[in-house]
Every structure is written in structure tokens, then in C-alpha cells.
């Protein structure tokens, strides 16, 4: 079954939000005698979502279902609140409270780690685990592909600032042939990245980012989504339409031709999806004010600067290179 057009998706998005807001207005009113009517409205809206769910992206489907569930929970809370209070109640014992409060809260540990985690959705023909490589709570660091990982892996980035994360495979200086054994990145999930440069080869899965600020992203993937981000330039090769939500001041440009040697199967001239960004906060037919298209010379200039990163060898060089790259990032190229 084919997907609906972007216009149809936007029309449904507008319809859904209008119905949802109407229900929220009723919930916020002082009259709670119409809870059955509210449940009926939510049920009808859920039916509409079910009817269109096979035609819309998974992300949209999950978001609609989550918002419907929140509405149902709000109705349930109102119903519970209006029930007569019981004459009797039970208090928690002091010993239980004391024991709970004495449990220390874990503190985030900076560093890099790898771990095997069960796949969220395992196919019927495979029960293998996926390797997740985690990089978190670091600043002013040069980060390259992990040396202690074999095969494919998913990368998790979180709480990074002033870092260069260059995930392209590199041939070892001693030319001992170990390059063939380097790990292969399949997907990237990132949150809370500030003043960072992130470079990936074209990966076979998705790249999902949240809370990115003042950064330069050079990414290739099958699916790209970015949320709650600002002041960031994105040079992108993506096989589906990229999605943004709750974002401002994003610039999109083409994946650098200078990286074509690393991805010889790409036809960069034919992939123009970076020009077709879907802004879920802007359902109108006019261009979204939350993103702009980077001029071709801007993409080329950024691509040339990306090559400069190949010569970076240590953490001590990171700040100087970031200053150069991110100062260009703020220009209007």
C-alpha cells in the first residue's frame, strides 16, 4: 500500500490537532459531567488514526497514539478525582519511607562503552543481539570509530559538548591490513549535543537526533529525524524525506562530494531529499521558517573543511578545528 502525499499528511495532521485541542479545551473546563462524551470523541479520533496508520510514517503513528493515550489518561484522572473520597486511609510506615530515601541516586559517568542489548524488534529468522556503543558526558574530545568492536553496531551519543565525532572508517597508519576488520556503523541515536561536529559514512539504518545546538552534522542514512534543535548545519544524504520537529534555525545542504571516495556507491547528484525537509510544526503550504537551504558553494566549502578533520590526531587540536568549522557554520554561505 502506497503512502499518502505530503499534502494529505499535513491535512490529517491539522485535523488531528484541531480535534485534540477541542478535547483538551473540554477537559480544562469546569464541567466534568461530559466525560462519556469525551471518551467517545477520543475513540472516534483513534479510529481515524487506525484507518490511516498504514499510510503514514511510523513516527507519526506512534506520536498520534501517544497523544491519544494521554487524553484517555486525563479523562481517567478526572473521573477518579470526582469520585467520593473514602472515609478511611492508610499511611506508609516510617521504616519503608526511610529505606527508600536512603537509596543513593546514580551519577552519570563520562566515557565510552559497548554493550550487547536485545533488539527492540527481532525478525523471525534471527534472534541475534545488537551491539550498542555508547559515548556520553564528554567535552573537548576527538572521537573516532571504536577499535574494540567487531561487526555492526549502533551508536548512542549523549551529553557531548565541543567534540569532534568522526565515524568514517580510517586506514591504520601502519597499513597492517586491519582496516577490513573495522566495525561498521548501522544507526545513530543522539541527544544533547552542543557545539559538536558529527561525521558519518552512509549507514544502512536511521539517524535520530534530539537537542542539538550550534553544531555541524555531516550525515548519510536511510532515515533522518531531528527534534528540539537549533542553530545547526546539516549536510545530508538520506533515502527518505528528512523530518524536523520543534526546531529553529536549521540549514540543510548536500552530503559533501569530497566524501564520495568513502561511499563509492552513492550518486550524490541524484539524491536531493535534503531539499525536501518535512517540518511537523509547519503544516502550511508556504515554506517553513524553521529551516533554510544552504547555498551550493556553502555545502562545498563545508565539505572541504571536513577533509581537514582527517589530519586531527589528538584532543589538543579539537578546539582549534571546531573554532574554524563552527565559525563557518554561523555564516550565511
Image (cartoon, rainbow, N blue to C red):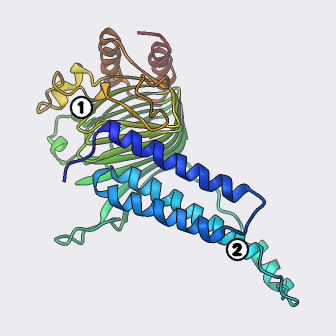
- Note whether 41 is above or below 12 in the view shown: below
Q: Residue at x 17, y 32 (%)?
A: 263
Q: CB of mark 2 within 8 Å of CB of mark 1? A: no
The residue singled out by tag 1 in the image is 173
On residue 129, which mark appears? none
Indicate the position of residue 90 as horizontal and vertical percent values: 84, 88
Q: CA distance from mark 2 to mark 1?
A: 68 Å
For mark 1, give the secondary structure: loop
Quadrant in the picture for residue 321: top left
Q: Residue at x 40, y 50 (%)?
A: 60
Indicate the position of residue 170 as horizontal and vertical percent values: 25, 34
The residue singled out by tag 2 in the image is 79
**Which residue is more in the foreground, 20 or 135?**
20
Mark 2 vs 1, N-terminal side: 2
Quadrant in the picture for residue 144: top left
- Note whether 193 is above or below 146 in the view shown: above
**Which residue is more in the foreground, 37 or 319?**
37
Amino acid at each position: 500500500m502506497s503512502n499518502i502525499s505530503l499534502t494529505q499528511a499535513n491535512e490529517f495532521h491539522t485535523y488531528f490537532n484541531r480535534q485534540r485541542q477541542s478535547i483538551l479545551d473540554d477537559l480544562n473546563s469546569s464541567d466534568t459531567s461530559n466525560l462519556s462524551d469525551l471518551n467517545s470523541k477520543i475513540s472516534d479520533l483513534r479510529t481515524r488514526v487506525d484507518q490511516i496508520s498504514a499510510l503514514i510514517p511510523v513516527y507519526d503513528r506512534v506520536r498520534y497514539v501517544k497523544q491519544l493515550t494521554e487524553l484517555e489518561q486525563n479523562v481517567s484522572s478526572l473521573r477518579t478525582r470526582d469520585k467520593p473520597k473514602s472515609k478511611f486511609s492508610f499511611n506508609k510506615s516510617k521504616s519503608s519511607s526511610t529505606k527508600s530515601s536512603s537509596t543513593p541516586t546514580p551519577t552519570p559517568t563520562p566515557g565510552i562503552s559497548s554493550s550487547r542489548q536485545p533488539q527492540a524488534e527481532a525478525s523471525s529468522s534471527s534472534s541475534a543481539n545488537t551491539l550498542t556503543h555508547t559515548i556520553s558526558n564528554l567535552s573537548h574530545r576527538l572521537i573516532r570509530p571504536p577499535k574494540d568492536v567487531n561487526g555492526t553496531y549502533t551508536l548512542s551519543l549523549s551529553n557531548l559538548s565541543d567534540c569532534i565525532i568522526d565515524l568514517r572508517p580510517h586506514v591504520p597508519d601502519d597499513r597492517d591490513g586491519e582496516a577490513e576488520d573495522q566495525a561498521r556503523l548501522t544507526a545513530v541515536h543522539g541527544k544533547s549535543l552542543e557545539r559538536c561536529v558529527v561525521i558519518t559514512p552512509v549507514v544502512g539504518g536511521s539517524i535520530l537526533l534530539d537537542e542539538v545546538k550550534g553544531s555541524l552534522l555531516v550525515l548519510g542514512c536511510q532515515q533522518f529525524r531531528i527534534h528540539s534543535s537549533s542553530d545547526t548545519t546539516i549536510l545530508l544524504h538520506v533515502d527518505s524525506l528528512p523530518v524536523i520537529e520543534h526546531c529553529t534555525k536549521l540549514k540543510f545542504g548536500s552530503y559533501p562530494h569530497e566524501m564520495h571516495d568513502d561511499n563509492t556507491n552513492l550518486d550524490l547528484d541524484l539524491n536531493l531529499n535534503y531539499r525536501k525537509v518535512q517540518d511537523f510544526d509547519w503544516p502550511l503550504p508556504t515554506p517553513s521558517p524553521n529551516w533554510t537551504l544552504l547555498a551550493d558553494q556553502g555545502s562545498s566549502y563545508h565539505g572541504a573543511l571536513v577533509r581537514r578533520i582527517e589530519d586531527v590526531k589528538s584532543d589538543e587540536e579539537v578546539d582549534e578545528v571546531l573554532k574554524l568549522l563552527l565559525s563557518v557554520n554561523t555564516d550565511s554561505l
